[in-house]
Amino acid sequence: MTKSNKLYSIFFNKCPRCGVGDFFVTKSAYNLKAFDKMHKQCSHCGLNLVPEPGFYQGALYVSYSFYVAFTVIYFLLYVNFFRDYLDYFLVSLIPMLIILTPYFYRLARRAWLALFIKPESV
Ligand SMILES: [Zn+2]
């Protein structure tokens, strides 16, 4: 797996073109003061990380798909392993979705930009 790979850049907070420069300012999704602060451009290759105003509205649909995928997987695991406690499914799901919100927010923005940017071959 080379460094300029879409999945690598999405999961490891890197620029989708070069895979070297950081995408978000902080490494952690749980730094509540700055988890949503992005670099304006890549510090390595200079790629503009905000191509146009409102570009990241599309990331909303990506994060929605992450929530749906997580909910379906969680439900299937729950039905298989905790069937006797099915009453608690929603009670446990909602706090988990809230806790995952900053993580999915960042993942969705990186995935959305990576859809439009071709990785540089190394
Ligand atoms: Zn870059």
Image (cartoon, rainbow, N blue to C red):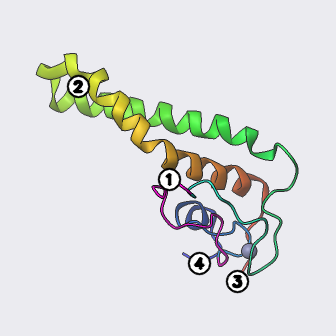
Q: Give, as a single range, the part of the protein colored magenta.
A: 20-33
What is the C-alpha distance between the residues marked 4 and 2? 38 Å
Q: Mark 1 points at which residue?
A: 32
Name the residue beneath numbered marker 4: 2
Residue annotated with mark 2: 79
Dominant secondary structure of the magenta stretch? Answer: loop
| Residue 8 horizontal side relative to residue 112, left or right | left
Which quadrant of the frame does ligand 1 lie within?
bottom right
Left or right: where 10 falls relative to 90: right
Tag 4: residue type? Thr
* Circle number at residue 122: 3
Identify residue type, mark 1: Leu
Q: Earlier along the polypeptide chain: callout 3 or callout 1?
A: 1
Query: Which residue is drawn at the image coordinates 70% and 83% (left, top)?
Result: 122
Asked whether the residues under the numbered discs 3 and 4 touch, taking CB atoms below 8 Å apart as contact, a structural biologist would say yes
Q: What element carries label 2?
A: helix
Tell me how far mark 1 sits from mark 4, CA to CA: 31 Å
Rendered-image quadrant of the N terminus: bottom right
The mark nearer the N terminus, 3 or 4, is: 4
From this view, report whether residue 51 is shown above or below residue 56.
below
In three-dimensional space, the C-alpha distance between marks 3 and 4, rounded to whole angstroms, equals 7 Å
In percent of width and height, residue 58 lies at 74, 39
